[in-house]
Amino acid sequence: MRPRAEMAAFISVPLKKSSEVDLVKPLSKFVTASYPAGDEQSEYLRAVEELNKLRKSALGRPLDKHESSLEILLRYYDQLCSIEPKFPFSENQLCLTFTWKDAFDKGSLFGGSVKLSLASLGYEKTCVLFNCAALASQIATEQNIDNDECLKAAAKYYQLASGAFSHIKDTVLSALSREPTMDICPETVGTLSTIMLAQAQEVFFLKATSDRMKDAVIAKLANQAADFYGEAFKQCQYKDNLPKYFYFQEVLPVLAAKHCIMQAHAELHQSILAKQKKRFGEEIARLQHAAELVKTVASRYDEYVSVKDLSDKINRALTAAKKDNDFIYHDRVPEVKDLEHIGKAALVKATAITPPLSQKYTDLFEKMVPMAVQQSMGIYGQRKADAVNRLVGTMREATNLCNGVLASLNLPAALEDLSGDSIPQSIAEKSRSIVQQGGLQNIEKLIRDLPELLTRNREILDESLKMLDDEETTDNELRSKFNQRWNRTPSGDLYKPLRAEGTNFRNVLDKAVQADQVVRDRYNAQCDMIALLCKPENELNAAIPSANPTRTLQGSEVVNVLRSLLAQLDEVKKERETLEGEIKAVTFDMSTTFLKALAQDGAINEEQLSLSQLDQSYGSYNQKVSASLSKQEELLGQVQTAHQEFSSLKQSNNEANQREEVLKKLASAHDSYVEICNNLREGTKFYNDLTEILLKFQNKCSDIVFARKTERDELLKELQQSIAREPSAPNFNVPAYQSTPAAPAPAPGPTPAPRTVFAQQPQQVQQQPQQKPQPPSRPPPPSFTPQAASATPTTPTPTGPPTSNPPPMAPPSQAQGPPYPTYQGYQGFYQMPMGYNPYTYGQYNMPNMPYMPYQAAPGQGGYPGAPPAGQPYPGYPQQPPQQQPYYPQQ
């Protein structure tokens, strides 16, 4: 604050200071983990660098009291509002700890100033907005009030500051999970908001005076400004904590003085209006009251505000009015309490804080979708994968069933084996196919690789959880040591989502192990027949029993019917392969739909939107799959009927039955070989993909543990400093008779802030002004009693000796008003009304391979046991419904 002209001592607010924070590393890690390499990722990484530079420009250097500096702060605040919904800022996800010092606490001899560190972007936003308001108040205070444009700028900035402080008051408690420092608590910023609004109203009064507007208007503007100053003074007096700040000790007398001065201006201009209406007695009464108000300021607050010119003006007007009334008008001078109320005209209001506030704002992350959309996209991707897996799994299960039925009937081998002594063509093709795929060696290699992949995943998971365990143990030990002083979120509570995710991974691995064993058991059951199919053709032929020829069936009608039915079944299976490719190729970008819903409703009904789109995308494929299953069922029924007729025509003997049994086993072994190889390849891919997921989980655990260690070290340092500042022995009171009454010594508290009010007055607040003949030394402000004139305060005499700590002060029983004469017409004071981020682990969306289908869902069974005789293997691992493929399909 500083006086530049009569009464113009405006109040400004100091800036908060912040510690340096590296935004690049954590935000870049999130970007690279969440977005595939490419132009989009590169653009976001560049934006992260720009955001870090912007924070350094806004907070890492002293700012000039100029609009350009405020623009930088506003741009940074706008960017924080923009990225808040796009990055998962929280203690247990993307953890960034911001440290800010109390703006009004200047530190002490034995330690640093009061500061608070929180892993909360809302805290950073609150503190940055506080600095925006503080800098706006400083810029407004620097304006030349003799210049019309400067007055307009001052009014604009004071209203912006008032709106920003008011916004903090309404939002700070919801933005922080812990008690804020005093400078940003609702009581403090509420008071600052009222002070800024009062100053904006005063600027409008000065503008109206400069423009020589009507006295009635000027009086109402001044009266409203007086009301605002009185409200601000009351808030400072009423709140116990605010006077503890040297800042508010300095501000209090200015507010009281401004209240009296603005009311005096209102009375002065209202007296002119009374004179114009020939109410000469009212004119004198108002001028007398104005003179009393100014006299109070001159006697108590001339160190803060000069009112000499105003006092002279009022006294001249009062002398002239009395002279005219005594000699000419002889009008009765009414009591002050009987005067008509002066109206009020509020031309100011707190600026609404609705980002963007900057005039040159451009969103660095404009293309990045909000986290709500990202999470909805993840869930939609899972729903889509489930729909695809269900359709593909249903078709594969139907194909396996068809192959199993044909193998049990020895088809098509029975139709090819009419000679009874050569290898059927289908069996020979199956043998060559297995040999080309690597035979037994291929399966055995895949089986040998699985335990190694499993062990690697278990080690990553165990190491991740061990990091959490170790940090939690340390946190519990320190909490037990420091008790209530260890005031941070317990690690056990913070790690619950991570531990739940780790338990889920553990269950996935356990079920995968069970599925591995089922595959091994099936391989062991089919190993001998698969080995037989791998032998050379002459050895395979020798191993198949011979039978009497059945050449009589070669030209029969039933053979032709069976061949036609088998050809149709082959066509159905080929159609399914085509259909499977089409289903996997379906794509639809739901981000636009989700963004539109978020913009319109403020929330996303993901389930409704996703199910509607999936029904639209896959409804026709559901019908095609159902039609394919119905056609296969019809053809298999016809095949079984024709095969019964075929069997009755064949010459039956033991040799023929033995040969047919071996051919059935060979056909089944081939189908099992293909299925087992697919299962093992899917298992290998499953473990490899799970490794990537677990590595991300490990990084997440590592990041939060590192952030917690950093926070722990900072908290330990603060605790050590606070312990060092504590007295080594308790204070005790000296009996009153051993000491002379004296004022308490000043407490060794925070170093007083340098006065910003008085650029032209070097003396400090504590210094007594030079002795003057009139008036006597000023006592402290008295309690205010409505309708009372200036009261002579009494200074209580201390009863104890000076101590190192200030004496405790009981809060006043009620708010005290400014010490000024008043009258019944003055409007009384009115008390102003007083004004966390659930952590949701988003599923990892791996390229073309979500892992969620392996998580146990409600109603989903475990992995299957050995299949019944003659039935195909149901799946690895089991997917809901039963007709799922082994692993999520690409």
Image (spheres, rainbow, N blue to C red):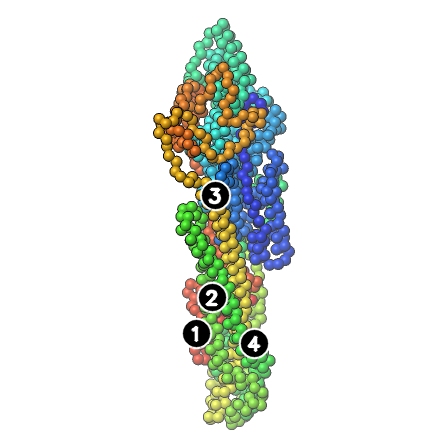
Q: Earlier in the sequence, mark 1 or mark 3?
A: 3
Question: Residue sitting at 62 percent across and 58 percent down?
Answer: 37
Question: Residue sitting at 41 percent across and 65 percent down?
Answer: 859
Specify the amino acid type for callout 3. Gln
Specify the amino acid type for callout 2. Val
Specify the amino acid type for callout 4. Glu
Q: Earlier in the sequence, mark 4 or mark 2?
A: 2
Q: Which residue is mark 4?
A: 571
Q: Which residue is mark 3?
A: 721
**Between marks 3 and 4 in the image, the one whose residue lies nearer the viewer:** 3
| SS category of the residue bearing label 3 | helix
Where residue 369 appears, as percent x and y from the top left, is 56, 52
Q: Earlier in the sequence, mark 4 or mark 1?
A: 4
Label 2 to label 3: alpha-carbon separation = 48 Å
Question: Residue sitting at 51 percent across and 94 percent down?
Answer: 548
Where residue 728 appears, as percent x and y from the top left, is 42, 40
Question: Residue sitting at 46 percent across and 65 percent down?
Answer: 506
